[in-house]
């Protein structure tokens, strides 16, 4: 895995940089301007993309936690920990960008509706994951408990994303039942001709969301390499201390 990470990380980094440049160009120069909200509506591309990638990060953490319990490995623990770290950041971006979008769209920064409340619960649940890790000193026990926790925590992800499609409240549905999804998309595509709406969908689903996914992949690879260096440094310090104590 070490050799593979060293080889693939630079590729992902450059790919992410290139896609970010293309994505920003498409968002600010290609996507049409919404008539009612104006340029504020462009935050839609960041909001939806970060939300979907947050789902992916927690799904990867779930898989890594299961793999760790089946066959304990430092690598799988690192994947889970790194994915949760990145997922918490993407969830934070989702919440903040959604709040900025909500002000001109709903005339309020925040509403404690079921959908919005559940995403805060999800965010707090994964923040608590790091509190658990820091509270356990034994390394093997910490990894095992963290793997169990990250599996159980995924229930909040299911509830959050299911609520967006099942519960009816102020938050629009972009993907879900046909009627409600059409209404949700309309909130982001107000006063557009069909051709302009198609350009919005292209930027959102064809450029912005894939860009966020590549950013996550690059970020995960870099975080795993960083953790490897931290582990090597910790092991080296332990050997030096042990030698000095016995010297």
Image: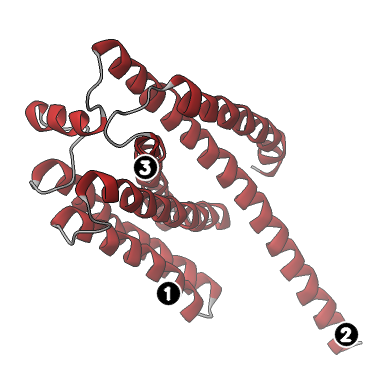
The spot of residue 234 in percent (x, y) is: 72, 70
Marks 3 and 1, how far apart in space? 29 Å
Marks 2 and 1: CB-CB under 8 Å? no
Q: Residues within 10 Å of mark 1 (few under 14, many from 20)?
A: some
Q: Is residue 114 left or right of residue 246?
A: left
Residue 132, numbered circle: 1
Point 53% across, 30% down: residue:
24
Could you tell me residue 152's position as x and y percent? Answer: 28, 61
CA distance separating discs 3 and 2:
53 Å
Crowding at label 2, few (<14), some or many (≥20) Cα neighbours within 10 Å? few
Q: Quadrant of the N terminus?
A: top right
Secondary structure found at label 3: helix
The secondary element bearing badge 1 is classed as helix
Where in the figure is residue 121, as x and y percent of width and height?
Answer: 26, 64
Give above or below for 202 relative to 113.
above
Q: Is residue 110 above or below residue 35?
A: below
Instruction: Determine the image quadrant of residue 47.
Output: top left
Q: Nearer the viewer, mark 3 or mark 2?
A: 3
Of residues 85 and 245, the one drawn nearer to the viewer in this rendering: 85
Residue depicted at 22% across the width and 23% down the height: 191
Pick whichever of labels 2 and 1 is earlier in the sequence. Answer: 1
Mark 3 lies on residue: 47
Q: Is residue 113 above or below residue 175?
A: below
Q: Nearer the viewer, residue 176 or 2?
A: 176
Q: Quadrant of the C terminus?
A: bottom right
Please identify, in this view, whether the residue under mark 3 or under mark 1 is nearer the observer: 3
Tell me whether circle 3 and circle 2 mark residues in contact (CB < 8 Å).
no
- Name which of mark 3 and mark 2 comes first in the sequence: 3
Relative image position of residue 215 (x, y in whole percent): 54, 38
Residue found 67% across the figure and 31% down from its top: 14
> Badge 2 is on which residue?
244
Residue located farthest toward the right when viewing the structure as drawn: 247
């Amino acid at each position: 895995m070490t050799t593979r990470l060293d080889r693939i990380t630079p590729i992902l980094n450059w790919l992410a940089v290139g896609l970010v440049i293309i994505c920003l160009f498409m968002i600010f120069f290609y996507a049409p301007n919404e008539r009612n909200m104006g340029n504020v509506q462009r935050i839609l591309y960041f909001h939806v993309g970060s939300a979907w990638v947050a789902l992916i990060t927690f799904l990867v953490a779930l898989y890594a936690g299961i793999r760790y319990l089946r066959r304990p490995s430092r690598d799988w623990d690192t994947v889970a920990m790194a994915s949760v770290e990145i997922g918490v950041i993407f969830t934070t971006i989702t919440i903040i960008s959604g709040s900025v979008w909500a002000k001109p769209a709903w005339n309020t920064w925040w509403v404690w509706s079921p959908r919005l409340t559940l995403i805060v619960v999800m965010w707090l649940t994964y923040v608590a994951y790091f509190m658990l890790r820091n509270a356990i000193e034994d390394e093997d026990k910490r990894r095992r408990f963290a793997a169990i926790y990250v599996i159980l925590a995924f229930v909040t992800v299911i509830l959050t994303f299911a609520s967006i499609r099942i519960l009816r409240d102020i938050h629009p549905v972009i993907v879900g039942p046909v009627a409600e999804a059409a209404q949700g998309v309309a909130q982001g595509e107000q006063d557009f001709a069909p051709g302009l709406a198609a350009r919005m969908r292209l930027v959102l689903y064809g450029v912005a969301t894939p860009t966020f996914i590549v950013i996550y992949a690059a970020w995960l690879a870099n975080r795993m390499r960083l953790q490897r260096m931290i582990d090597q440094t910790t092991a080296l310090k332990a050997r030096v201390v042990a030698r000095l104590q016995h010297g």
